[in-house]
Image (cartoon, rainbow, N blue to C red):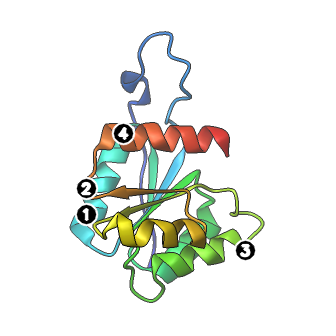
C-alpha cells in the first residue's frame, strides 16, 4: 500500500508573534491508525497545523513508512493489525536511523493498564482519545525539540 501524504500549510498562523517555538512546517508526522476515519481526522488536524503527514493503516506498514520517510514524530494507536503498537515501538527502537524518533501512543485503551507497557516498549508518551489537539501539539513540539 502506498503511503498517503498531506503537505502542511499554515504553521505560521499557529504561532504567536515572537514565539520561540519551532514551526511545524517541514516536520513530518507519521499517523499510524487502523480506523480510516480516525486516521483522516488526526491527519487533517496535523496538516491544518502545518505538518507534513504520512499515514499507515497497520503495524507492518508503519515500520515501512517510518523507514522510508524518517518522520520527526510518530502518533500511533496500540491496536494495529499485523503488528500491534507495542511491537512496532520495539522494532523502531532497534533501528539506528529511527531510535530517537519520538512515539506518542494515541489510544482509547485504559492508560492505567497500558501506559506503563507502552513506555516499556519504547514509546515516549501516552495520550487518550478523544484527543485534545492543542495539548497534543504542545507535547509533540516538546518531544521533537528534545529528540
For the residues bearing labels 4 and 1, Cβ distance under 8 angstroms: no
Q: Secondary structure at mark 3?
A: loop
Q: Which residue is mark 4?
A: 135
Which residue is rendered at x = 50% and y = 67% of the image? 116
Residue positioned 37% across, 26% down in the render: 14
Of labels 4 and 1, the one closer to you: 4
> Which residue sits furthest right?
96
Residue of label 3:
94
Residue 38: give its label: 1
Asked if labels 1 and 3 touch by Cβ distance under 8 angstroms, the answer is no
Which label belongs to residue 25? none
Cα–Cα gap, marks 3 and 1: 28 Å
Q: Residue 43 in the image: state x and y as whole percent.
A: 34, 54
| Residue 6 versus residue 96 in the image, above or below | above
Image x and y of residue 60, in percent: 51, 82
Q: Secondary structure at mark 2?
A: helix
The quarter of the image holding the N terminus is bottom left
Q: Name the element at disc 1.
A: helix
Residue occupying image coordinates x 39% and y 35%: 9
Question: Label 4 to label 2, Cα distance in Å?
Answer: 16 Å
Q: Nearer the viewer, mark 4 or mark 2?
A: 4
Q: Earlier in the sequence, mark 3 or mark 1?
A: 1
Amino acid at each position: 500500500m502506498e503511503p498517503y501524504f498531506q503537505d502542511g500549510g499554515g504553521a505560521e498562523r499557529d504561532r504567536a508573534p515572537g514565539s520561540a517555538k519551532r514551526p511545524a512546517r517541514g516536520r513530518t508526522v507519521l499517523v499510524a491508525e487502523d480506523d480510516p476515519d480516525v486516521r483522516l481526522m488526526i491527519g487533517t488536524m496535523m496538516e491544518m497545523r502545518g505538518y507534513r503527514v504520512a499515514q499507515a493503516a497497520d503495524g507492518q506498514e508503519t515500520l515501512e513508512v517510518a523507514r522510508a520517510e524518517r518522520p520527526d514524530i510518530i502518533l500511533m494507536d496500540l491496536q494495529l493489525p499485523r503488528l500491534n503498537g507495542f511491537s512496532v515501538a520495539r522494532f523502531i527502537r532497534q533501528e539506528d536511523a529511527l531510535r530517537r524518533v519520538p512515539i506518542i501512543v494515541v489510544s482509547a485503551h485504559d492508560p492505567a493498564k497500558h501506559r506503563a507497557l507502552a513506555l516499556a516498549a519504547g514509546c515516549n508518551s501516552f495520550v487518550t482519545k478523544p484527543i485534545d489537539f492543542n495539548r497534543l501539539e504542545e507535547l509533540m513540539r516538546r518531544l521533537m525539540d528534545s529528540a
